[in-house]
Amino acid sequence: MYFCGKYTIMSASLFLIPVTLGETAIPKVLPPYNKAVILSLGHFIVENERTARRFLKQTEPDIDIDVLTFYTLNKHTSKEELSGFLKPIADGHSVGIISEAGCPAIADPGADIVAIAQQKNIRVIPLVGPSSILLALMASGFNGQSFAFQGYLPIDNDQRIKTLKNLELRVYSENQTQLFIETPYRNGKLVEDILKTCKPATKLCIAADITLESEFIKTKSIMEWKKQIPELSKRPCIFALYK
Amino acid sequence: MYFCGKYTIMSASLFLIPVTLGETAIPKVLPPYNKAVILSLGHFIVENERTARRFLKQTEPDIDIDVLTFYTLNKHTSKEELSGFLKPIADGHSVGIISEAGCPAIADPGADIVAIAQQKNIRVIPLVGPSSILLALMASGFNGQSFAFQGYLPIDNDQRIKTLKNLELRVYSENQTQLFIETPYRNGKLVEDILKTCKPATKLCIAADITLESEFIKTKSIMEWKKQIPELSKRPCIFALYK
């Protein structure tokens, strides 16, 4: 057991460390506790070492980055390598996973390492931070008692239309809010596809630039959206459908 | 436009204000920005005035609660009353919705008032806070690129077993993590039902007391859970199924 600021933490653990969603001040979206945890760690699993270093410097300008060990996690990392990243925990040192944006293991490769940690019976401690999916759902006014996040829709046009129709069906048959994302430069095309595929009365929430100065979260019916579509290219967006 | 601590906020808006998940220090789970927002508001929509006052006092012991206006939101509140709660915004005063636990409008009645705000073209601003659903998903090691929260399962035994089978089917057919909750005193019964209904190799994550000192988040196969089941009665839990 060791102390981390005012907080007591038991045994070596895997901490899941969220980051900001783009250019936001850290106190706007991250609890002070996260900083206390970060400053207690010497080992970090990251997707991109450069952006992780930048985040650590933002968290604490006086941090001595050179004494820290970084392990790079991406889709090419083998399962054996992943397992090795958790070695410090066996030696009594906690490890942190830092996401590229938002919360680790939600729509990013962190989930694989968490799965290995769970198999190894390592304690996994998730820290609070901004999730664009959850923030969009909160602000949409849609059903928060039943919802699904579908990730990216298929790129193939027919598949994509079919998927949109199925999601809309599930909105009505299961009262379930359906959330999904798109690569920012294709946001405009996705909105077009939604507007031409879904029923006029179905509601669409478009949530762009969540937690940023330019945040835009708006729910309208398909019919209303057809009158005016916001400019969404290059803006990270969450889309949600409900009735 | 007015200033709120170091942050600038445009026009009167509806703020969605998360709270702690039980007895946790505020700096552990809430960003400093939330306090700045709270101290700038004079109108709060709450589920329970007593717990909301307590949360505000915890946020800022010197807060003058007597000058604040509270509007009580529960399942008996009519749509007309709800609409009236947003009246201060038309007069230029922002309003906050304070949840009973976690994030407003996720698995609580706040979503109805957000829907009305969206219809009235009021800006809705969600603040970051702890969501037991999202934290459980992060720490489960399960698929975070596709997941669904199903709320409560049916109470009727046959319906419940059928629902569990359908959710397990969706785990395999759609690679979708399935999350759900239960009233704490029935947690034990739900785990029994899961263990007797799902395949031995299917994985179950049990996440109890999230963000509390007694936090317990563990993923095992159904087969492994059968060897030992943790005591879960009276502990708020999230359950997740995946393969």
Image (cartoon, coloured by chain):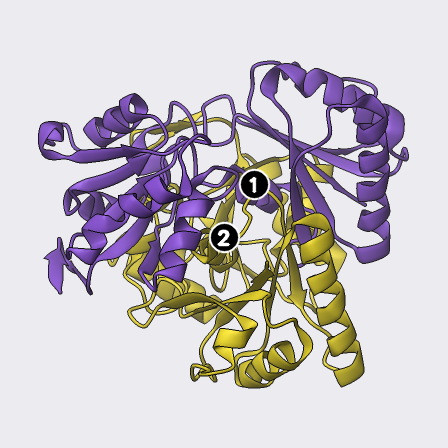
Chain colours: A yellow, B purple
Does residue B206 appear left or right of residue B27 in this picture? right
Give the residue drawn at x 67%, y 17%.
B186
SS class of the residue under badge 2? helix
Instruction: State left or right for residue A153 relative to residue B23.
Output: right
Q: In this view, does B231 lie above or below A185?
A: above
Q: Which residue is drawn at 18% across and 47% down?
A: B36
Query: Circle 2 sits on which residue?
Result: A134
Picture coordinates of residue A81 (x, y %)? 70, 57
The answer to whether one can see residue B166 in this image is: yes
- To which quarter of the image does residue B136 belong? top right
Task: Tell me residue B47's x, y (percent).
Answer: 37, 30
Image quarter for residue B123? bottom left
In the picture as drawn, the residue positioned furthest to the front comes out as B80
Q: In this view, does B230 lie above or below A234?
A: above
Give the quadrant of residue B98.
Answer: top left
Amino acid on which the number 1 mark rests in the picture: Ile
**Residue B118 vs residue B83, the one in the foreground:** B83
Say which mark, if any, is on residue B133.
Answer: 1
Task: Locate residue B177, reporting x and y percent.
Answer: 72, 48
